[in-house]
Image: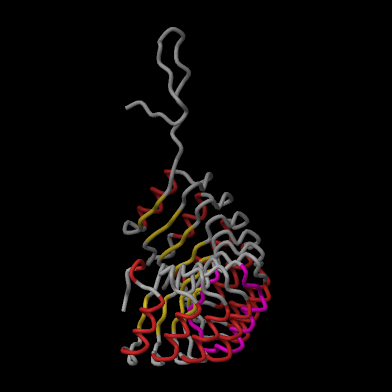
Amino acid sequence: MGAAYADVTHSTCYSLSRFCSKLKHLDLTSCVSITNSSLKGISEGCRNLEYLNLSWCDQITKDGIEALVRGCQGLKALLLRGCTQLEDEALKHIQNYCHELVSLNLQSCSRITDEGVVQICRGCHRLQALCLSGCSNLTDASLTALGLNCPRLQILEAARCSHLTDAGFTLLARNCHDLEKMDLEECILITDSTLIQLSIHCPKLQALSLSHCELITDDGILHLSNSTCGHERLRVLELDNCLLITDVALEHLENCRGLERLELYDCQQVTRAGIKRMRAQLPHVKVHAYFAPVTPPTAVAGSGQRLCRCCVIL
């Protein structure tokens, strides 16, 4: 069941609880009137819920989560994007009651720390998808907990988690061999070492975002391209603003025969010629890149023509 955010109120949730006891799927995205009391109402009557989306319901706190999970212990997917009041104690409640959970989204829950993620990992061993993007307090302790407790993990989104390092991703890769999708955008401390570990231990990897990971070089792409995932699985690779990437990386990527999309915005050492050579070998791949227009020559004095740096004369 989906809902228009303007129409859902506290009384709506109690009506659902009273009349929809078999409800399994509920999407309350951006229903800003939802409160802790609303979740208590849902938990009392909708005990068969398996999927609940509470993204951007920003009045919710740990008390609402506790009431919810006490009643809805069969939850398999819980989306809490933008629930900015949630802290680690909310995750402790999820750990205590939601042992069937396979998907959890905590995007932009900026108060969450390693303590909360460790608790989730220890209680939710079946976790397959976890979004931590924008949880900027996290460190390698969270990756360690994932690696040691959640071997079924397939999707990890950790964009803008700028404290994560090669050490954490090394432990994760060595224990989570089913990883298929990783978003590491703005994980600014990682180097080619992370790519080497993913290449060795994660043969199912299909989509990888490394945008703004400015320490990644052609050598890291070489290891990725020569791996099992590179040869057989890799479909999407995002390298926007990886300033050390050159045309050499594109030559390596010619080994990735299944590659469907490559992002190269603001890779300043990549050239049009390099992209053209790669596409000659991989004609099906969609390459997104940007090249600043060539600065036009200075106008001859008295010509009256003035151009900014980004203008192109056709």
How many tags in the picture?
0
Position in image of residue 35 (x %, y %): 48, 75
Residue 263 to residue 149: above or below = above
Percent position (x, y) of residue 219? Answer: 58, 59
Place residue 283 in its image quadrant. Answer: bottom left
Residue 159 location, quadrant: bottom right
Quarter that holds the C terminus: top left
| Magenta region, residue range | 111-132
Instruction: Give the colour scheme shown.
Output: secondary structure
Q: Nearer the viewer, residue 301 or 200?
A: 301
Look at the image and say whether residue 125 sits in the magenta stretch: yes
Of 115 and 153, the residue lying toward us: 115
- State the residue lying farthest toward the front: 11
User: Eyeballing the image, is 219 above or below 28?
Assistant: above
User: In the image, 298: left or right of 149?
Assistant: left
Residue projecting furthest to the top: 302
Q: Residue drawn 55% across and 89% down?
A: 125
The N terminus lies in quadrant:
bottom left
| Residue at (58, 79) in percent of width and height | 62
Does 160 sit above or below residue 202? above
Q: Is residue 32 left or right of residue 20?
A: right
Q: Pinpoint residue 18: horizontal percent, then vertical percent.
A: 35, 89
